[in-house]
Amino acid sequence: MTAEVSITYERVVEAAARIEGGVLRSPCVPSPHLSEICKAEIWCKLDYQQATGSFKERGARNALLLLNPTQRSRGVVAASAGNHALALAYHGRDLKVPITVVMPKFAPLVKQVRCRDYGARVVLHGDNIADARQRADEFVAAESLSYINGFNDAAIISGAGTCALEIFDQVSEPDAIVVPVGGGGLIAGVSLVSRERRAATKVIGVESARCPSMTAALAAGHPVRVSAQPSLADGLGVPEVGPTSFEIARGRIDQVVTVDEESITRAILALAELEKGVVEGAGATPLAAFLAGRLRPLEGMRVVLVLCGGNIDPTVFARVIEHGLAIEGRLIQFLAVIKDRPGGLAELASAIASTGASIKQVSHERAFGDADVSKVQVLCQVEVRGGPHASELYTLLRAKEIEVIARGGLKEIQGG
């Protein structure tokens, strides 16, 4: 039976009824702040608010509910970088189905810990999803477990499509839906529903430039394996899209674009700062595509961004926020050469404060500084409003005869 026959709009509707009450009907809200930035009417589908932090719950619960009694008693196994594993573990506990998840060794610690907390057996194996899948297949053979693919399974794709059913109930006549793409299950389900509910709505996929598997598949006319490099969008690091997902999506999606790490960083920061939401790299890619200028044809349109996941490691999130501030020129770092005398550092701090900038960190450098022992280098990390504010600060410091050497946060210093 082909994918076109086995996965239909009616199957998605059935899945929605099946998972109702067990999965959050997530909000889809307008964002004035992002609308201004993106020059479009932006709505955000907040699927990162699911109990386990991602849209994966939709397909996971649907798939588990479709198991027969024997399959449920033996349990299931899956290979996942985290979100599919979390969803199966959480709903497996609720439905009393034993869960085994095989994660690549690089899977975020927070996801590993939470899977174990939900009662799943967690096995770490390999460097990517393909390696983890090989180990999962061994469990299928040895223990007769049922394998549930996170993006190429009919029940999973049908469950993912319920996200789009909600979008069309929540947003009147969206012009476009922008969807993260990893293995292809989500965009397959969304595009299937979209073509049924409103054919004029564009469905646009976004991939990490470090793992453009759907882009490669569309170019070749069939799924092909690509090199998957480490990315902030770790949830999209699937080196080959699922054949079933691809067959559904290929004739229904309008475009696929890729985004770089800098754009993903800026998107995570913007969502935290403007929308007060903690969204992981994969979930932030729809906004990243706007920030990178990849979706300019959508300006002026009503656009839904599917923010599909929020499971970012806290330590990574902290680094991303600081790096994002530096990218935007709001966190700068420079060396200031001052006189090594009492009050010298106080004069520097006073000058910085007088411009309204905020000192985050300072440290003296004597051993590796200039041979002139009457002076000392001070490494400063300072928060500013942006490039013009930084330039204002540098100009003031030079006017006070303080030598300034930029280290980061502003590529060029005016007058330097």
Image: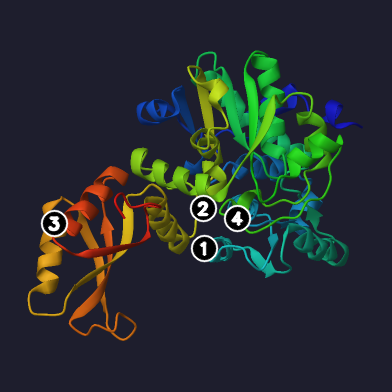
Give the label on residue 110, or none.
1
Q: CA distance from mark 1 to mark 4?
A: 17 Å
Q: CA distance from mark 2 to mark 1?
A: 8 Å
Secondary element at tag 1: helix
Secondary element at tag 4: loop
- Quadrant in which the N terminus is drawn: top right
Contact between marks 3 and 2 (CB within 8 A): the answer is: no
Secondary element at tag 3: helix
Does the image show residue 52?
no
Q: CA distance from mark 1 to mark 3?
A: 39 Å
Q: What residue is rendered at 80% in x and 34% in y? A: 218
Viewer-proximal residue among 252 and 323:
323
Q: What residue is rendered at 15% in x and 50% in y? A: 355
Give, as a three-letter code, the residue at label 3.
Ala
Contact between marks 4 and 3 (CB within 8 A): the answer is: no
Location of mark 4 (residue): 231
Q: Position of residue 229 (x, y in %)?
A: 68, 57
Give, as a three-letter code, the residue at label 2.
Asn
Residue 372 sits in quarter: bottom left
Q: What residue is rendered at 58% in x and 22% in y? A: 176
Location of mark 3 (residue): 353
Mark toward the viewer: 4 or 3: 3
Contact between marks 2 and 1 (CB within 8 A): the answer is: yes
Residue positioned most to the left: 343
Q: What residue is rendered at 66% in x and 68% in y? A: 105
